[in-house]
Amino acid sequence: MKAKILNHPLIEHKLAILRDKKTGTKEFREIASEIAMFLCYEATRDARLEEVEIETPIEKMKAKKLDEDQYAFVPILRAGTGMLDGLTNVIPNAKIGHIGLYRNEETLEPVKYYYKVPKDIQNREVMILDPMLATGGSALDAISMIKKEGVKKIKFLCIIAAPEGIARIEKEYPDVEIYAAALDRELNDKGYIMPGLGDAGDRIFGTK
Ligand code: PRP
Ligand code: URA
């Protein structure tokens, strides 16, 4: 499975605003959420639909509705929560889990501090959310935790991916589908994505 990179003028436009260091917290949050909605649009192309009978003002017809019970969204704290609104706006009945991870600034290894997922998660398709896929350490840990729950279908949705992170997921978990709004050049020596957008968590929450 090759990573799916959104390739669309609207995404380019939104990314230009998001990446700009002059963009403030309010707009950053709004755009992160909008891009997440587009990622969700792309990641639900294979969604299961159910036939329902409805009546338009003109006549009866057979229509198709999404089985919303098929999904669980799992943002990686903190920054992943900045994508959650975008997905719940379009699939409001999905269940939500949370994985708390932060990167140790020296080793770049993820440190786990929180974990709570829906009881019936093994029966659902899981979309893991994190705006930044850098070294891939956080993504691999999150995927491994969700796999341990017995989940069969996992998608990883991010706004910006580094080639290093994509390569690690593709090697360790070739069955996990990756959706990214942009594929950037490389990582710098501090593990930041170049050109990237800086620290996503700090920009979403205004902590720096
Ligand atoms: C950021 C980002 C990812 C991780 C990506 O989180 O949101 O979770 O780094 O890096 P990796 O691919 O090298 O693991 P951070 O640790 O800064 O935590 P935060 O979301 O609380 O700011
Ligand atoms: N985490 C971020 O928030 N930004 C990066 O560029 C890399 C990891």
Image: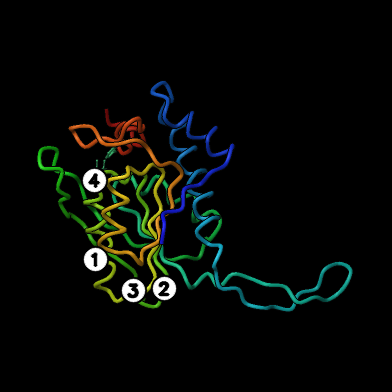
Foreground tag (1 vs 4): 4
The answer to which image quadrant residue 185 occupies is top left
Point out the tag, 3 or 2, that comes first from the N-terminus.
Answer: 2
| Mark 3 residue's CB less than 8 Å from ligand 1 | no
Left or right: residue 28 versus residue 191 is right
Are the residues flagged by discs 3 and 2 in contact, CB closer than 8 Å?
yes
How many tags in the picture?
Answer: 4
Q: Quadrant of ligand 1?
A: top left
How far is mark 3 from mark 2, CA to CA?
7 Å
| Residue where numbered disc 4 is placed | 135
Rendered location of residue 123, percent (x, y): 39, 78
Amino acid type, callout 4: Thr
Rendered location of residue 72, percent (x, y): 41, 66
Foreground tag (4 vs 3): 4
How far is mark 2 from mark 1, CA to CA?
15 Å
Image mark for residue 124? 2
How far is mark 2 from mark 4, CA to CA?
27 Å
Point out the tag, 1 or 3, that comes first from the N-terminus.
Answer: 1
Seen from the viewer's position, the closer of residues 204 and 134 is 134
| Residue where numbered disc 1 is placed | 145
The figure's colour scheme reads: rainbow
Q: Residue at x 33, y 64 (%)?
A: 174
How far is mark 1 from mark 4, CA to CA?
18 Å
| Mark 4 residue's CB less than 8 Å from ligand 1 | yes
Rendered location of residue 74, percent (x, y): 35, 59
| Residue where numbered disc 3 is placed | 151
Rendered location of residue 64, percent (x, y): 67, 72
Point out the tag, 4 or 3, that comes first from the N-terminus.
Answer: 4
Where's the N terminus, which quadrant?
A: bottom left
Seen from the viewer's position, the closer of residues 135 and 49 is 135
Amino acid type, callout 2: Arg
Left or right: residue 107 versus residue 60 is left
